[in-house]
Image: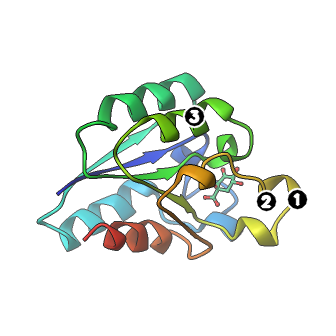
Amino acid sequence: KKLIIINGPNLNLLGKREPNVYGSLTFTEFFETIKEKYPNIQLEHYQSNVEGELIDKLQEVGFSYDGIILNAAAYTHTSVGIGDAVKAIETPVVEVHISNTYSREKFRHKSFISPNARGVILGFGLQSYELALQSFI
Ligand code: DQA
């Protein structure tokens, strides 16, 4: 199986960004352990702070990969374009959030991704990504 984790803006700062909310592990550290744990999965990771680059990546992988694990971060709540891309592609998308966005500010309760996602996993810290991965196997 070929899967990709796509991370949106500011998630390159995991480990040093609001560790009380997002934890103290860097994404690279987490990604390495997950790759070792699931050696039979072809797992890739892409991160961008740029909305259009996230759309480009969704289009690039969205007709050939078996699954996309998408944390669009702040763009989740604002981006019609990323929402449309998720709808346009064929590869199923599981939406992921590290924090429980529903226990936070109201502006985080809206998602442009969810209506077209296969499912949504949020609030379990970095483990949310692993649960999303398991949903594809
Ligand atoms: C996030 C939640 C978003 O509201 C926030 O803008 C992020 C990270 C999460 O993983 O908890 O950047 O997607």
Q: Which label's residue is closer to the chain start, 1 or 3?
A: 3
Residue 86 image point, x, y percent:
50, 41
Q: Is residue 47 visible?
A: yes
Vertical arrangement, residue 18 with respect to residue 130, above or below: above
- Contact between marks 1 and 2 (CB within 8 A): the answer is yes
Identify residue for label 2.
109
Q: Nearer the viewer, residue 33 or 64?
A: 64
Q: Is residue 50 visible?
A: no
The residue at 23%/39% (across/down) is 64
Residue 137 image point, x, y percent:
24, 71
In front: mark 1 or mark 3?
Answer: 3
As shown in the figure, which amino acid type bears the numbered disc 1? Lys
Residue 116 image point, x, y percent:
55, 50
The residue at 34%/59% (across/down) is 31
Marks 1 and 2 sit apart, C-alpha to C-alpha, by: 5 Å
Marks 3 and 2 sit apart, C-alpha to C-alpha, by: 19 Å
Marks 1 and 3 sit apart, C-alpha to C-alpha, by: 22 Å
Q: Secondary structure at mark 2?
A: loop
How crowded pointer 3 is (Cα within 10 Å; few <14, some 14-19, many 20+) is rated as some
Q: Which label's residue is closer to the chain start, 3 or 2?
A: 3
- Contact between marks 3 and 2 (CB within 8 A): the answer is no
The residue at 66%/67% (across/down) is 99
**Residue 114 relative to residue 118: left or right:** right
**Residue 73 relative to residue 48: left or right:** right
Residue 97 image point, x, y percent:
59, 62
Identify residue for label 1.
106
Q: Secondary structure at mark 1?
A: helix
Identify residue for label 3.
84
